Image (cartoon, helix red, strand yellow):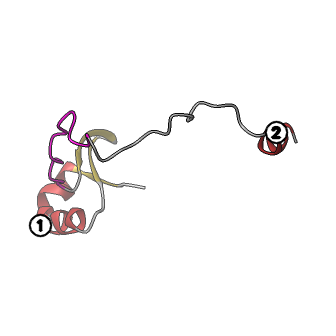
């Protein structure tokens, strides 16, 4: 659950709040009890995915869509 602080408290204790955010906590800054901003930890953007980068690393069996054995189907029918 995020911690909520008012604007005055956020200005007064900004460094302390940043330390909490650095530890993973989320801080909601509110004005007159209504949220106006959120402080969250900065996370590096993951590298962009490159289509086809797994080519040759994955194989799919020719019978991957074959019907399941009766013994397995019975488990679903319970």
- Can you identify the residue that label 2 sits on? 70
For discs 1 and 2, the disc positioned in front in the rendered view: 2
Quarter of the figure that contains the N terminus: bottom left
| Magenta span of residues | 42-55
| Drawn side of residue 45 relative to residue 57, left or right | left
Distance between mark 1 and mark 2 Cα atoms: 63 Å
Residue 62: image location, x then y, percent? 51, 34
Q: Looking at the image, is mark 1 or mark 2 earlier in the sequence?
A: 1
State the residue at coordinates (23%, 52%).
40
State the residue at coordinates (15%, 46%).
47
The disc label shown at residue 15, or none: 1
Tell me if residue 71 is in the magenta stretch: no
Quarter of the figure that contains the C terminus: top right
How crowded pointer 2 is (Cα within 10 Å; few <14, some 14-19, many 20+) is rated as few
| Drawn side of residue 59 relative to residue 35, left or right | right
Quarter of the rendering containing residue 68: top right
| Drawn side of residue 74 relative to residue 69, left or right | right
């Amino acid at each position: 659950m995020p911690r909520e602080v008012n604007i005055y408290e956020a200005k007064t204790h900004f460094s302390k709040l940043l330390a909490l955010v650095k530890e993973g906590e989320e801080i909601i800054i509110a004005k007159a009890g209504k949220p106006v901003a959120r402080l969250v930890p900065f996370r590096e953007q993951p590298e962009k995915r490159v289509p086809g980068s797994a080519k040759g690393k994955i194989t799919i069996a020719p019978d991957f869509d074959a019907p399941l054995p009766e013994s397995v189907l019975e488990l679903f029918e319970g």
